[in-house]
Image (cartoon, grey):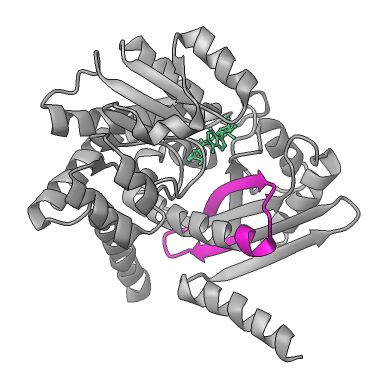
Amino acid sequence: MSGNSSIVNSVLDQIGASGHKKVVYCNDPDTGLKAIIAIHDTTLGPAIGGTRMWNYATEAEALEDVLRLSRAMTYKAAITGLNLGGGNAVIIGDSYKGKSEAMMRSYGRFIKNLNGEFITAEDVGTNTRDMEYIQMETKHVTGVPESLGGAGNPAPTTAKGVFLGIKACVKEVFGTDMLAGRSVVVQGIGNVGEHLVELLRAENVEVYISDINEDRLQHVARTYKAKPISADKIFGINADIYAPCALGATVNSKTIEKMKFAIIAGSANNQLADEQLHGKLLLDKGILFAPDYLINAGGLISCYSELTGYGKKRTMQLTENIYNATRDVIKMSKKDNIPTIWAANRIAEQRIIDIKKIKSSF
Ligand SMILES: NC(=O)c1ccc[n+]([C@@H]2O[C@H](COP(=O)([O-])OP(=O)(O)OC[C@H]3O[C@@H](n4cnc5c(N)ncnc54)[C@H](O)[C@@H]3O)[C@@H](O)[C@H]2O)c1
């Protein structure tokens, strides 16, 4: 009995400490679905966020990931000026072997039961086909194929935003945003990473790539004339920019110590293992960090356009704004001598505070 209550306490404490509104555990033995949906904040609008399918070693690891991812979505929507809240979901399992139509539709029914409080889209381990299955059960899904009236895979728009974030940082560090001759390490060349490699190579950037999927690595290397490197080489390499496009927490005390990069700018969510500690370490070491949730907002913008019926033109306008928004964050960080992630957090939090006030005024 005491063991059970300590588990409950630790889960609820964790949810409370991160400021979450609601966490839903989904279990369907018939389809093998085990998922967690986390809703962080809905001040600005319904919570939106991807569904990640990953083979987590433990449920505790899955919970920690979904809590971190959903909080980041709140900040992403807020700083991008969208009327959306933050949420996210994880499905525990192997996305290559453990997925089925029934599982995705079952998951869609759990989302349906949230009555619009949570809207989902693709993330690591899920794709437009999965969103199509979810849409068979609920309308609260985006990133469905264009042939079904959706905006399609958000990854190309995400990559475009990351590319512009990189340019804004290069302008700051090197005095020009011309990328030719610069070098970038892209870690993870999946949906977003591959598009980013394409954009960088089109500007004659020297691109190093790394991925745990060897076939993909060789394919992308051949297609774009990028240089494959092994995972253990990433943090020692002499390149201008590190673009994390796989999973989070790759910027930590161990990796920062080895880094010779001038800039970190990529698509992965929650790149800093600890925003307070590692934000400060990067500032002290003179490495410019582009806040991940700011520069990877292109995908969210694409999903927002799908929800609101905005066209591609508006999606591109909002995505292009990532360049100036990144410059503004860098400016605030320099003026107040604070890490860029703290500056971004301030801007995002202020918008939520302001909108909360107007919502409670009448
Ligand atoms: N897809 C989007 O529009 C979008 C939007 C915002 C943020 N993100 C974030 O960007 C990242 C990439 O998303 P994606 O959609 O391209 O996912 P994806 O699953 O298509 O690609 C991820 C790639 O990373 C590789 N990988 C995993 N672990 C690795 C490791 N340790 N080292 C090297 N490679 C590794 C995988 O093999 C895969 O090729 C994720 O963190 C995701 O949350 C994606």
- State the image coordinates of residue 190 (x, y, percent, origin top left): 55, 28
48 vs 17, nearest the viewer: 17
Quadrant that contains the C terminus: bottom left
Q: Vertical placement of 298 versus 201: above or below?
A: below
At 13% from the left and 46% from the top, the residue drawn is 331
Whereabouts is ligand 1, in terms of quadrant? top right
Q: Vertical placement of 55 versus 323: above or below?
A: below
**Left or right: 101 in relation to 271:** right
Quadrant that contains the N terminus: bottom right
89 vs 83, nearest the viewer: 89
Residue 244 visible at all: yes
At 62% from the left and 54% from the top, the residue drawn is 89
Residue 291 visible at all: no
Q: Residue 295 occupies which quadrant of the picture?
A: top left
Q: Vertical placement of 248 versus 301: above or below?
A: below
- State the image coordinates of residue 125 (x, y, percent, origin top left): 65, 38
View extreme (right): residue: 30
Task: Look at the image and say whether residue 60 sits in the magenta stretch.
Answer: yes
Q: Which residues are magenta?
A: 38-62
- State the image coordinates of residue 150 (x, y, percent, origin top left): 60, 32
- State the image coordinates of residue 226 (x, y, percent, origin top left): 44, 14
